[in-house]
Amino acid sequence: MSRVLATYNIKGGVGKTSAAVNLATLAAHDGAQTLLWDLDPQGASTYLFRVKPKIKGGGAKLVRGKTDVDGQIKGTDTDGLDLLPADFSYRHMDLALDGAKTNRLNRVIKPLGEYEYVFLDCPPSISLVSENVFEAADALLVPIIPATLSSRTLDQLHEVLSGGPKVLGFFSMADRRKKLHRELMEELGREHDVLETVIPTSADVERMGAERAALVDFAPRSRAALAYADLWNEIRARLAS
Amino acid sequence: MPVVTHVLPEGADLSSARSALTDHLPLRAGRATRRTTTFYDTFDGRLHGAGLTLQHTGTALALSVRETGDEVASATVGAAPKRLFDRDLPAALAKWLAPEIEMRALLPVARLRTHELPLALLNEDTKTVARLTLSVTDDGTRGRVTATAIRGYESALERVQTTLVEKLALPEATVPLVDEAIAAAGGQPAGTSAKLSLALDPDEPANVAAARVFTRLVEVIRDNFPGTLDDVDSEFLHDLRVAVRRTRSLQRQFKTVYPERLQHFRDEFKRIQGVTGDLRDLDVYLLDFDDLKASLPEKMQADLEPLRTVIERRRARALTATRRALRAERTAGALSDWERFVTDRRPSDRTVGSLASHRITQVYRKMVKLGSAIDDDSPAEDLHELRKVGKELRYLLEFFASLYPTEVVKPFVKTLKGLQDQLGRFQDREVQANALRELAPALQDSPHTVMAMGVLVERFMQEELAARAEFAERFEAFASKAQRAIVKEHFG
């Protein structure tokens, strides 16, 4: 059975897609068959992989089991990493999931046992999609920007989730030169279980949009890419424990 | 994912092949690499026969399906090994390979130094939609281009294939690379068989047909000489000895067509068999050792180990003696003289069909007579004698199988084999029990080992009795009225 890892945050713009794309690429580099499902209707990770954001029949048919999932999966430029693309219709996914007795995301993911890892790149907000994700995922990878508002995310998540997936929070887009960032990281680190690796704020990460590739592929020696590699090792260790 | 492989033009290098492809397809080149690939098989081509290919590249040992190239299993090892037995294989590979190779060693059968260039076929978004690899070698094999589909973009592979065939006239590769590599290295992809595989004509003069069988047997002996001398695996000596034993059997069966000098050659082959016998016996003990050990009660198992040391020490001495005897000029001379002796003869008046039928009938009748006289009180020697005669019959049927209808020979051999296996079990147990008794004095300082050996001897003796109890039933099938009628009809 696949390990399902969801990058999730109630807020947008915190480095979710960047984490999903880079971590999934690193997993594939390790030789693990990996799938990334871009659940965000804006399709940022689909764009980065140069794949057309299109699911035949739309998201509703896909989660209702009317569309053959296998036929929708696309290989990426990275050997071992496949993508289940975004579709603009995912913005109505809540409607498609409403009223279902079973977890429909799970029903799509379960038969894909050939993949050692399935990454879910989730849209922000707490919604039916999120609830389905919480149930399907073995772990939530939660990027946190060390700013007051963003940091409340962990508290909110712990309120929503009890007994669900592992919540692996990590600092993202952190700037150690800022006093506020340093103080918040220290404080949060004391109060919550947050991973040790910090993904720094970096112009290299922003270049992903122009390069249309994973940072760990086009600049593997950059500081942020090395941080993703550390983060992946830490996550794997946590999954094994 | 679907893969296609096409052959590059003779003499093509990476850059010429790349520019030819780039003229027709939007490609992005990766970094060229060099690597060395070593292919492995047993001497008799067991992996080839099983439809498998084992190759070492970099630090990976990978097993794949011959025809499709699909990888079945792989493992990380160090440098390319010189020789691999089942016990040396990583578990992921042993599962597949051990049942195929049994006691044989996997040996390097070809080595290729390859230059490779990965190419990505791009679409209008410069996304990779198919992966290509150009590879050329320094070792006399033709270069290849391999294209692999990417999930969701299968139609791109069709486009590549159309270009390769229609624009560049590159034929699809039909021979697996491993076969081409072995052929380029001067070897045979299917390995070296010790089987006879002869088609004889019943009207041929007996000595002419016999010469073909004898010549083939000398060939098998020579094929297995180097591996025996280098002590590669135990099967070399075994196959060599089987060919010697078969030669001796046919010498006995066909002695009427040869003059008196035959005795000289019979003595020479007897000598070769004699000087290799100890080594083979000790090989068999070592091959069986782990099974014997495992058959003991668990707390006695470790006690048997000192026996292995004694056997290994004796084997080392036997190997030296065998090498000396086989390397001696006398042995090489005897084989050449023998070849000349059997091929330089005037054709005899008797046809091989008539002589073979006569001998098969005679030996069968002798077996029926000997077997019918055996009862519960007969000494063990009577059963041994029956087995020896059975071997003669088995060889006759093997040598001359092509002279008779398959539907007659096959069931005949099967019934005979049933009897022989049973007689063999009986004799093996007796031989094993005697061997352990003989080895016991060498282990007088290890009383626990001797005790463990005692447990084995006890069991061998019981199994010997059990095998004997089965004799009557097996013999009845072999000597049945129906079987006698068949022999009379086809060989009489």
Image (spheres, coloured by chain):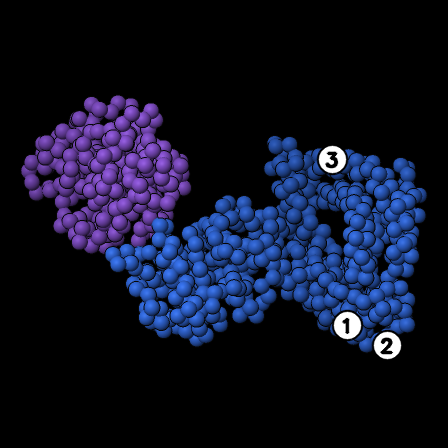
Chain colours: A purple, B blue
For label 1, the crowd category at 10 Å Cα-Cα, with few meaning under 14, some 14 to 19 and many 20 or more, is some
Marks 2/3 same chain: yes
Q: Please report, as a chain letter, where disc 1 is located.
A: B
- Residue in the image at 58% along x and 57% along y: B48
Label 3 resides on the chain identified as B
Reply above or below: B257 against B306: below
Residue beneath the point at 91% across and 53% down: B488
Q: Residue under circle 1?
A: B339
- Check disc 3 and report the residue beneath it: B459
Query: SS for tag 3?
Result: helix
Which residue is drawn at the image coordinates 45% and 74% (left, top)? Answer: B10
Q: Which of B432 and B342 is in front in this view?
A: B342
Q: Give the number of the mark in front: 2 or 3.
A: 2
Q: Is mark 2 on a helix, strand or loop?
A: loop
Q: Can residue B73 be seen in this view?
A: yes
Residue B47 image position (x, y, % from top left): 58, 55
- What amino acid type should be assigned to the residue bearing mark 1? Glu
**Residue drawn 58% across the image and 63% down it:** B189
Is disc 3 in contact with disc 1, using a CB cutoff of under 8 Å? no
Q: Which residue is labeled 2 in the image?
A: B346
Q: In this view, does A226 lie above or below A171?
A: below
- The tag on residue A240 is none
- Label 3 or label 1, whichever lies nearer to me, is 1
Q: How many angstroms separate mark 3 from mark 1 (CA)?
A: 46 Å
Q: Nearer the viewer, mark 2 or mark 1?
A: 2
Residue A233: x percent and y percent? Answer: 29, 41
